[in-house]
Amino acid sequence: MSAEKVLWRGSPVRFPFLDRGVPAFVFHVIVNGVLLGFVLSFAKGGSWFQVVLVGAWATYLACYVIGGPVLRWLALHTTEYVLTEDQVITTYSVLGIRRRRVRELAELPEPELVETPDGVGTIRFGYTLSIQQVSDARSVHTMIMNLREAENAA
């Protein structure tokens, strides 16, 4: 990034708790509930193993239900996006662990803009990357499209 010119730098301005992955979340809870019910239907005697198994399963499900959205919410608060001529760089920190993802613009799928009336929006590159909840998302999307067109023309 040191040799490249930074064209845009931004951070999320909104921090939704349950945003992306809600269908997968609901599916996971339903499937685990059905499986837990199936296990409990065979737990007539209530042996210690079945009690431990159900307790471990309930603990896992509670951590997934609560922990996943909380960690995503915390990561969004520390996220910074940088757009250069060739790359999209995402930096975030969760529980003191700093992560940096660098993606080549040419390798990303076509960007899709999801915008609210006030201009805040998310730019999704398929399932590989998203620039979430940034202000003036339309101008960032236009900038990305122009960079892609210039690269394809060259």
Image: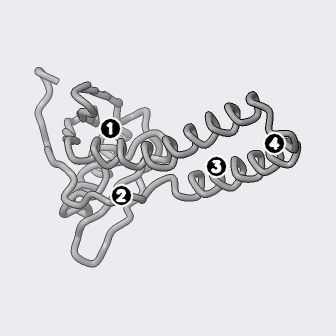
Q: What element does badge 1 sit on? A: helix
Q: Earlier in the sequence, mark 4 or mark 3?
A: 3
Residue type indicated by callout 2: Phe
Q: Earlier in the sequence, mark 3 or mark 1?
A: 3
In this orientation, does residue 89 appear? no
Q: Specify the color scheme.
A: one colour
Q: Residues within 10 Å of mark 2 (few under 14, many from 20)?
A: some
Q: Earlier in the sequence, mark 1 or mark 4?
A: 4
Query: CB atoms at circles 1 and 2 under 8 Å apart?
Result: no
Q: Which of labels 3 and 1 is toward the front?
A: 3
The residue wearing badge 3 is 28
The residue wearing badge 4 is 39
Mark 1 and mark 2: span between their CA atoms? 36 Å
Residue under the image location 30 percent in, 63 percent down: 121
Q: Residues within 10 Å of mark 1 (few under 14, many from 20)?
A: few
Q: Which of labels 4 and 2 is toward the front?
A: 4
In the image, residue 119 lies at what x, y percent?
23, 70
Residue type indicated by callout 3: His
Q: Residues within 10 Å of mark 4 (few under 14, many from 20)?
A: some
Mark 1 and mark 4: span between their CA atoms? 56 Å
Identify the disc placed on residue 17: 2
